[in-house]
Image (spheres, grey):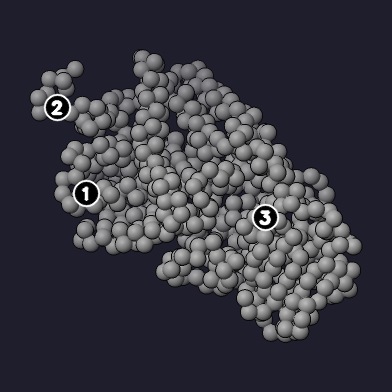
Amino acid sequence: MKPLVLLCSFALCAYAGVRLLDGDWFMVALWFVGAAVVHDLVLLPLYAAADRALVKGARRRRTWVVYARVPAALSGLLLLVWFPLITGRVSERYAGVAGLSADGYAVRWLIVTAVLFGGSAVVFAVRMRRGRRAPGVS
Amino acid sequence: MPRSFLPTRPVRGPFSPDFWRSPLRGPRFTSVLGVVLLAGVTILFVTGLLSYAAYNPDLAPVNDKTPGKGLLGFYLFPWPTDPPWLYRLTQGVHVTLGLVLVPVLLAKLWSVAPRLFTLPPARSLTHALERISLLLLVGGALFEFTTGILNVQLDYVFPGSFYPLHFYGAWVFFGAFAAHAVLKAPVAVRNLRRMREGGGEDADGPAAPRPDPPTVSRRGALGLVGGGSLLFLVTSAGRSFDAPLRETAVLTPHGGPEPGSGPGAFQINKTAAYAGIRAAETNEAAWRLAVTGPTGTVRLGRAGLLGMPLHSVALPIACVEGWSTSDQWWRGVRLRDLAALVGHDDPVDVFVESLQRHGAFRRGALRANQVADPRSLLALFVNGEELTLDHGYPARIIVPAAPGVLATKWVARLTFGEL
């Protein structure tokens, strides 16, 4: 059953794949495989290491980690997706094509990041004051 | 550390199961994310295929950016004109849902990361095939998400034209996705059912054998993924609507404030300056619309067009990049009246050419059902005023439910008949 499903799948992948590679085949293949490699061997180890460093740095205050991890993860996600606009690398084209300014993206991302960390800090402060422990922590 | 004294486990680093310490990883976490992606990616694929059909690529070579598609265009059908918000809905869902699924995709890949590092690399031929299929699955997913996300930001760094890359890439991805769904969905559903019944976990999963103490519950981790998705939703969905909702799309292209003020203050895909339109070509004295059909060619200035019966319609603009406007009030001449002017009384296709100097869609074809629709106009006015230059002055096409790129601006020539 499993080999049959895989072979059917490969037939479709190959049929579309030769069309995908029609053109600058090397660069397209590099992007396709490179996307997986960059994710698995660069992005994932980087954010996993950052998280591990955060947990280690917190030592006994492991329950506090979540208040930094959540806003950092959300802000990082936004940066990962919108970095062309946030870094300004497409500002000129965006203004020319759409007639809109791209100048505000970096500032808005910083504001969103500040709101996320600020909100997290408020929740942290409220929970500390009530003397409640964060949920889900052993 | 005891593990260094284990002679039976000489492997260190990520190939050792002990390397992976998160207590979150396990069949349940993976299954929840997998089922969400099964539904989400299916919707992305279907709405993507609909967007491809909306261009009517089988109508004329000029509409077809993928002439070698072969069997992959098997499902193509004449794109309808009803409901008029059809493309606005399908493409808004496609792009917004794609953004919303980014955290889910990344979490899913994180949850199965240990599986990447297995020794020996292939235990059997079937296992080797399965791993190749997974490369196509992961590479395909990331390729599709990356090209789509870069394209909506106009960051054209990918190696080639977006249309063939995203279309053929989608089929490669879907080939691997379908196999993965057939092989893994039953396991995922079984895991979720057990979860609901409070039973034990499936032993064969990516769970860590020696997990660290948890810093967050599984529910908390899923909450973070859901929070990420929600964040993308609230910072993107607004660009499918007008102000003030558009202002909520703070980090998305075509979010934020509308361009300018007045009747022409709605979203622009390509400005006149970018398209290379010069005022010398569009002024009253210079501009003539050439309309060609079986009875010959008629040349009309704006005055000539204003002498024809004018009609008003309320229609949105919806872009392949996922943003759209709500209804604008367009006023102009019906395309079918222009067809009749040159001898076509029956429904007929039309080839539209713009003054635009460059751009893949400076020329486009519309199908007979689109030309025949009484709401399809060569618009001269919008929202009670003359078109602005950025919105296509002196004349532009507007067709219900058609993608924005086929609403050609700065129209110079209409050729009715067989394409």
Residue at point 89%, 62% (across, down): B284
- Comparing labels 1 and 3, the label whose residue is closer to the camera: 3
CA–CA distance between discs 2 and 1?
Answer: 23 Å
Checking the image for residue B10, the label placed there is: 2
CA–CA distance between discs 1 and 3?
Answer: 47 Å
Q: Earlier in the sequence, mark 2 or mark 1?
A: 2
Residue B79, image x, y percentages = 58, 70
Q: Earlier in the sequence, mark 1 or mark 3?
A: 1
Disc 3 element:
loop
B223, above or below B189, in the image: above
Callout 1: residue from which chain? B
Q: Is residue B87 left or right of residue B130?
A: right
Checking the image for residue B128, the label placed there is: 1
Asked whether residue B219 appears in the rendered view, the answer is no
Callout 3: residue from which chain? B
Which residue corresponds to mark 3?
B358
Q: Looking at the image, do the residues carrying marks 2 and 1 touch, with CB atoms under 8 Å apart?
A: no
Q: Looking at the image, do the residues carrying marks 2 and 3 touch, with CB atoms under 8 Å apart?
A: no
